[in-house]
């Protein structure tokens, strides 16, 4: 009997939450059902999702920043169809791969100056793992420096340079590497002076919290690394491919890293892929002889499907001016949100670049709201943002996320094809929820209490 994908979907649609609960992640299933983030989605296009009842959801999460060109972009879909028709000689391994080579060539044309060699992999975490190996081989040193709040993946090596304790807890002992404050060049220099540092791993804009590098910091960090013989690894896994209004966030500060890691949006959201871009002298140290030509390898590296998706995604970014669009749309959304800060006392700050934006809340001035703020934070440090996100989802059909555990920050990373109308829909919905949040007692505060009770009982 022929395999029928559409029939398989029809037979099982509606079982998503049960399948998650029974076979993969029961705790996450509980979270989704508790906060109402469990619609049965049946279609996605651009910056929108639709459920089985035809409801239109505005996606301000984009699969954690995967869908820069939007969900199911027709040009990427067509490229995949074309690829399936050519019966490519894929993954020869002891041979060459044409499409991966073409993609590498095009990536290097748009990368920061000095990066001239590419290693393809399957994810951002794998790219970070490889980058750290390369840095050790190049420098002959072992120690890594990373930043508080930095996030570089959850595999064991990547976890050792993860600046968020909630992800590290329970998996130790990790590599005894050094955490420093983000943006503190003096702290970086103090560690580099010890002479045993292989690399400084840094996000130009930190994804967890959307903390933006201070002006001058990254250039100084590069100069310090160069002075003390260390490598600077720029993690552009989430900030790459137009997210910040530049092709890569490093461009905002003229940073020329020694190694750059990319992933997420590279395939248009269609398949796992990632890459390490690095300088040729680093390559010479890693792949140092003929018998070490595959000393670092990955089974699905250079696979044709990932290369096709990457080539099509780069073409879309260029042809449709999506990077420029992200800069313009992001500026509009940022300015409109910043205009709300003085009007609503729960709003502390709005910051961002392009279409990575943080909305940060803070303790209110008025006595009644302060009582609600204190109460909900005593229950759980993460509850206030969830109390905002739940009505955004339930009442306004807008999907977004908290920026990190223990932060009163909502993060917006929508597809870069977000329109002005989409922005206005978000702004109107967010302000309506914000209005409700300024009434205590009220429904929004009750949402927080309900979530807290469910968390205790689970």
Image (cartoon, rainbow, N blue to C red):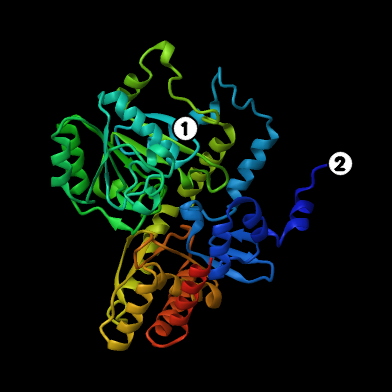
Q: Nearer the viewer, residue 313 or 444?
A: 444
126 up-or-down from 441: above or below = above
**68 and 214: which is toward the camera:** 214
The part of the image, by quadrant, that contains residue 172 is: top left
The answer for how far apart the CA atoms under marks 1 and 2 are is 37 Å
| Residue 34 picture location, percent across and down | 55, 69
Q: Let me know if residue 107 appears in the view.
A: no
Q: Earlier in the sequence, mark 1 or mark 2?
A: 2
Q: Could you say which is closer to the camera, residue 23 or residue 210?
A: 23
Q: Few, some or many C-alpha atoms within 10 Å of disc 2 (few <14, some 14-19, many ≥20)?
A: few
Residue 93: which disc?
A: none
Q: Secondary structure at mark 1?
A: strand
Q: Is residue 294 left or right of residue 362?
A: right
Q: Quadrant of the N terminus?
A: top right
Label 1 vs label 2, nearer the camera: 2
What percent of the width, then of the height, locates residue 443? 47, 84
Give the number of the disc on residue 1: 2
Q: Is residue 420 visible?
A: yes
Residue at (51, 40) in percent of width and height: 310
Callout 2 secondary element: loop
Question: Which residue occupies 28% across, 77% down?
Answer: 363
Residue 416 screen position, x and y as percent: 46, 57
Q: Is residue 30 left or right of residue 12?
A: left
Q: Is residue 304 above or below residue 42?
A: above
Image spot of residue 453 (x, y percent):
49, 74
Q: Quadrant of residue 71?
A: bottom right
Number of numbered discs overlaid on the protein picture: 2
At a point 36% along the width and 58% down the height, the residue shown is 354
Q: Which residue is mark 1?
A: 120
């Amino acid at each position: 009997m022929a395999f029928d994908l559409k029939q398989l979907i029809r037979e099982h649609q509606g079982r998503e939450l049960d399948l998650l609960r029974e076979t993969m992640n029961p705790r996450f299933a509980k979270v989704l059902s508790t906060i109402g983030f469990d619609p049965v989605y049946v279609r996605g296009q651009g910056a929108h999702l639709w459920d089985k009842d035809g409801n239109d959801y505005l996606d301000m999460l984009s699969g954690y920043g995967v869908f820069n060109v939007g969900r199911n972009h027709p040009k990427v879909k067509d490229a995949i169809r074309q690829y399936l028709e050519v019966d490519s000689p894929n993954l020869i391994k002891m041979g060459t791969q044409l499409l991966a080579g073409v993609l590498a060539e095009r990536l290097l044309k748009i990368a920061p100056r000095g990066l001239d060699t590419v290693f393809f992999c399957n994810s951002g975490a794998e790219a970070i793992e490889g980058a750290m190996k390369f840095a050790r081989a190049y420098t002959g040193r072992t120690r890594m420096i990373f930043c508080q709040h930095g996030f570089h993946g959850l595999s064991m090596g990547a976890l050792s340079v993860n600046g968020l304790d909630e992800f590290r807890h329970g998996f130790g002992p990790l590599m005894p590497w050094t955490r420093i404050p983000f943006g503190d060049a003096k702290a970086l220099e103090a560690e580099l002076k010890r002479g045993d540092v292989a690399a400084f791993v840094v996000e130009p804009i930190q994804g967890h919290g959307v903390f933006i590098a201070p002006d001058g910091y990254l250039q100084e960090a590069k100069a310090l690394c160069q002075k003390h013989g260390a490598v600077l690894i720029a993690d552009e896994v989430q900030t790459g491919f137009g997210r910040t209004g530049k092709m890569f966030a490093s461009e905002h500060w003229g940073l020329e890293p020694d190694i750059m890691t990319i992933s997420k949006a590279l395939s248009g959201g269609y398949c796992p892929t990632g890459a390490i871009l690095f300088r040729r002298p680093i390559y010479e140290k890693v792949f140092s002889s003929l018998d070490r030509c595959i000393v670092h390898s990955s089974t699905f590296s250079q696979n044709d499907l990932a290369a096709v998706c990457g080539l099509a995604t780069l073409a879309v970014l260029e042809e449709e001016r999506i990077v420029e669009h992200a800069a313009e749309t992001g500026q509009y959304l940022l300015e409109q949100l910043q205009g709300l800060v003085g009007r609503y006392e729960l709003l502390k700050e709005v910051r961002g670049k392009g279409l990575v934006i943080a909305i940060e809340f803070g303790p209110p001035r008025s006595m009644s709201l302060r009582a609600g703020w204190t109460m909900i934070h005593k229950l759980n440090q993460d509850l206030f943002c969830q109390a905002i996100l739940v009505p955004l989802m339930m009442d306004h059909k807008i999907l977004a996320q908290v920026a990190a555990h223990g932060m009163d920050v909502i993060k917006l990373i929508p597809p870069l094809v977000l329109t002005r109308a989409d922005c206005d829909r978000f702004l109107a919905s967010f302000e309506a929820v914000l209005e409700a949040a300024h009434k205590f007692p009220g429904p929004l505060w009750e949402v927080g209490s309900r979530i807290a009770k469910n968390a205790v009982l689970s």
